[in-house]
Image (cartoon, grey):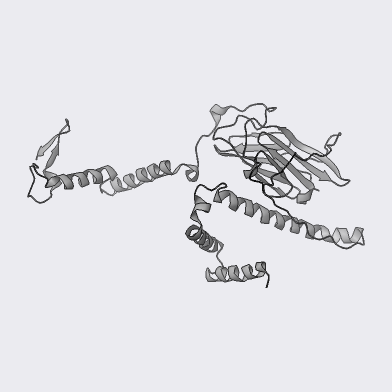
Amino acid sequence: MSSAGHHDTVLAHILTQEHNSLPSFLNAVFGFLSRHCPEEMYGSAHISGEHLISQSYCKWRQKYLDDKASQSLLPERCKEEDVPVALSEEVVISHNRLNGSHAVSTGTADTASGGSTASYPNSSGPYSKSRKHDSNFDTTNGAVRDSYAWTQTIEDMEVRVTVPDNVLRGKQVRVILQASFIEVGVQEPGLVWHTLLKGKLIHNIKAEESLWSLLPGEHISIHLEKSEECWWDRLMSSEDPIDLKKISAERDYATLPQEERQKIQQLVWNKQQQDQGKPTTDQLKMESVLRKAWNIEGSPFQGKPYDPSLINFTAGGSFGKG
């Protein structure tokens, strides 16, 4: 049995044990990873576990979409040409951790180039088949342009580039990402390449941690990891800036540093304690100090049972018997 077949058997067994519940299945998988390789998933690894998950998801999602597109085109191709059906497209993924300044992508995962970036001919005429941007795309903190749109969080960018309806395969797309440069092109019948987006980014990105995927006949989604946490007033230097004063600067709870998340958790817990008439964190700390000081030498309460009601805090901060 091949390794893939063996994995399918094991994973199918886990899915069955979890009553075919996808959330429960994923919870079991991530539970396993948290026990066996927590540092790689949640620690200070070179690439975060979240990025690895997103990368793998995009790879297999693209394969699914490519296979689906191939099936939908199969009857038409068989009618037009009496030739054998082509083999399914294989997405090749490679990594070069020593060269993070270039990423020439021809698949759904980040692909690092070991040398100069690829180039290809551009169309000299108007791109008549390109479509307008999908209005369903949430462009909060971003902007809508003629053939693309973008949005952002403090940490990353999401760019959506519309494509003609005959761009159905990943091999018809070429995305070039560098630290401060982006270029997106598509290929139509006749092997003619059209550039849809090209220019200098207003700020730097982590090219090797960025990735893209194609929704056939609809758009290319590009995820860009910012080199620094900041708000961008435009995607490319050639764009008109947006008004950063109108940005919604709220951050998703999961993206906050651990220290800030702990503070929020403490505030929520204290509010719940207050609503239930129970002591808050500060009150519990004070009680712990009082218990330790209750019977120390020189304490006016030495030898007496602990009774915090005997303490009378004054405005000056001292205390005495009530």
Residue 185, horizontal then vertical, whole percent: 77, 41
User: In front here: 291 or 266?
Assistant: 291
Q: Nearer the viewer, residue 300 or 112?
A: 112
**Residue in the image at 58% along x and 27% along y:** 243
As drawn, the residue found furthest toward the front would be 98
Spot occupied by residue 107 in the image (x, y as percentages of width and height): 72, 50
52 vs 265, nearest the viewer: 52
How many numbered dots are placed on residues in this image?
A: 0
Residue 128 shown left or right of residue 236 in the figure: right
Work out which quarter of the rendered image holds the C terminus and state it.
top left
Q: Is residue 115 above or below residue 90?
A: above
What's the residue at 85%, 62% (across, down)?
Answer: 85
Q: Is residue 117 left or right of residue 192?
A: left
Which quarter of the rendered picture does the N terminus lie within?
bottom right
Q: Residue furthest bottom?
A: 1
Residue in view at x 81 percent, y 61 percent = 87
Asked if residue 115 shows in the view, the reply is yes
- The image quadrant that residue 296 belongs to is top left
Whether residue 131 is visible, yes or no, is no
Residue 100, x across and y down, in percent:
64, 41
Q: Is residue 243 above or below residue 31?
A: above
Task: Where is residue 138? Give x, y as percent.
Answer: 61, 41
